[in-house]
Amino acid sequence: MKVLAGCWWDAACALAVPVVIQAGFELWDRGGLAWSAAGELAATWAAAGVVVGAVAWLLLRHRARRSGITLTPDALAGHQTRQLRVLRPSVGWSDRMCTELKASYRASVTAEKGREEIWFHWRPGRGKRTVWGSIAFDEPSGTVVLDLRASGAYTGSSGLGRGASFVALCQVAGELGLVEAESWRTVGDQV
């Protein structure tokens, strides 16, 4: 519910500017804003905010389910850290993941710390803006720690201002074959 409320709030804030502009035009054209026109604008703003917020929430939920990541109440936070398991561990899985990460058109690897950790930029949307990320490998246990942070300049995920790190988390997990420890058995059984 917290994610849905956050999506609605972001949508309502994004839609407030066109409503204020429309109210300004009403004031200019008619020399004043009638109560009926103000009511129509408020109703349109509220309905559009609910629809856009619900669509953004559904998109986040769909991404989460598709990638095997749990949609938590902090999904709209700018910083996402999760410990994930490798879906199909095999000999040299960390090297394979490094190669896949470097080959991804969404990733730009900036630094490597041996075979233990990689720092990268990830582009969750279609634009050029990225989130910062690092992936630390624990080969004996078959787990990785994925840490993603949206920069202050990033302003978009599903058309809203927050959630870019969660979208990137879902994309990286899906592309590298990672799942959460709790969903390990259910996703593994489905494959």
Image: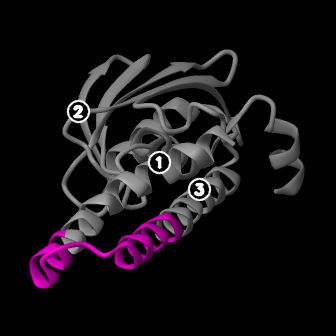
In whole angstroms, how far apart are the C-alphas of marks 2 and 3?
22 Å
The mark nearer the N terminus, 2 or 3, is 3
Residue type pointed to by label 1: Trp
Q: Is residue 74 above or below residue 190?
A: above
Secondary structure of the residue carrying tag 2 is loop
Residue type pointed to by label 3: Trp
Horizontal side of 36 relative to 26 (left or right) equals right
Q: What is the magenta segment's predominant secondary structure?
A: helix
Which tag is nearer the camera, tag 1 or tag 2? Answer: 1
Which image quarter holds the N terminus?
top right
Residue type pointed to by label 2: Gly
Identify the residue position indicated by label 2 in the image. 152
Q: Are marks 1 and 2 in contact (CB under 8 Å)?
A: no
Identify the residue position indicated by label 3 in the image. 57
Q: For the magenta stretch, what is the residue range?
A: 24-47
Residue at 29% across / 67% down in the picture? 19
Identify the residue position indicated by label 1 in the image. 9
Residue at 16% across / 73% down in the picture? 27
As for residue 39 lying within the magenta part, the answer is yes
The mark nearer the N terminus, 1 or 2, is 1
Which tag is nearer the camera, tag 1 or tag 3? Answer: 1
> Residue 69: image x %, image y %?
66, 42
Residue at 40% across / 45% down in the picture? 164
> Residue 96: image x %, image y %?
49, 40
Which image quarter holds the C terminus?
bottom right
